[in-house]
Amino acid sequence: MNLSSSGKMDPPEPTIESVSAALEALGPLLEDTEGVGIVGSLARGDLRPRSDIDILVVEKEDAGHDSSFWHSTIGKCLRRFDRDVSVLVFTIPVLKKVPDWNTLGLAADAIMVHDEGKVAPVLKRIVDKAHSVGLRRDYSDRWPVFKMNRPLKFGEIIKVELENDE
């Protein structure tokens, strides 16, 4: 930490290593998850001074926590960075449904801090499926987006969803 001009200690700059260490300190709570990862700008390497810290939690289906539990727990865990914290909570079946375009981004960006062995392969299959239907990662006004590599037909639906056996 550095002293600011007001004499207060500046919060530490979040890095992959420092955020990972803070998340790993959750210890036994990680056993309630299939995995926890860093996503968003920190994972992509384009964190800005006012960026939040985005965390992916893939909870075990029988863990019994609700999303507010994870928001509160991880928010407290990362409080020392003095940043907003966004926590995205999924189960493996919900993650496989790829509920929105943001799910593609987190699948492409995720740096897993804790993984029971199921999450990283599912994230890779999501990205592979996106590529197989013609989606590619691009940047629009510095923001990462997925775009089709061909013109779309009016009303065309692009489906990126993993089957339960995938």
Image (cartoon, rainbow, N blue to C red):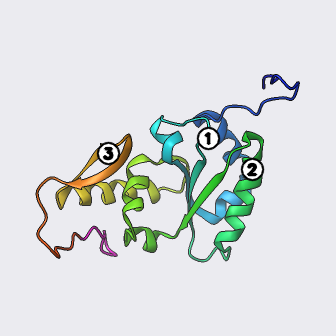
Q: Which residue, given by chain and number where applicable, does mark 3 sit on?
A: 140
Circle 2 packing at 10 Å, graded few (<14), some (14-19), many (20+), is some
Give how far across and how far down residue 40 sits, in percent: 49, 47
Disc 3 from disc 2: Cα separation = 33 Å
Mark 1 / mark 3, whichever is N-terminal: 1
Circle 3 packing at 10 Å, graded few (<14), some (14-19), many (20+), is few
Circle 1 packing at 10 Å, graded few (<14), some (14-19), many (20+), is few
Q: Which residue, given by chain and number where applicable, does mark 2 sit on?
A: 77
Badge 3 marks a residue whose secondary structure is strand
Name the side, left or right, on which 113 lies relative to 119.
right
Residue at (46, 69) in percent of width and height: 92
Is 101 in front, or is 36?
Answer: 101
Q: Which residues are magenta?
A: 159-166
Q: Quadrant of residue 155?
A: bottom left
Residue at (68, 73) in percent of width and height: 65
Question: Callout 1, which amino acid?
Answer: Arg
Give how far across and how far down residue 27 sits, in percent: 72, 52
Mark 3 / mark 2, whichever is N-terminal: 2
Give how far across and how far down residue 50 sits, in percent: 61, 40
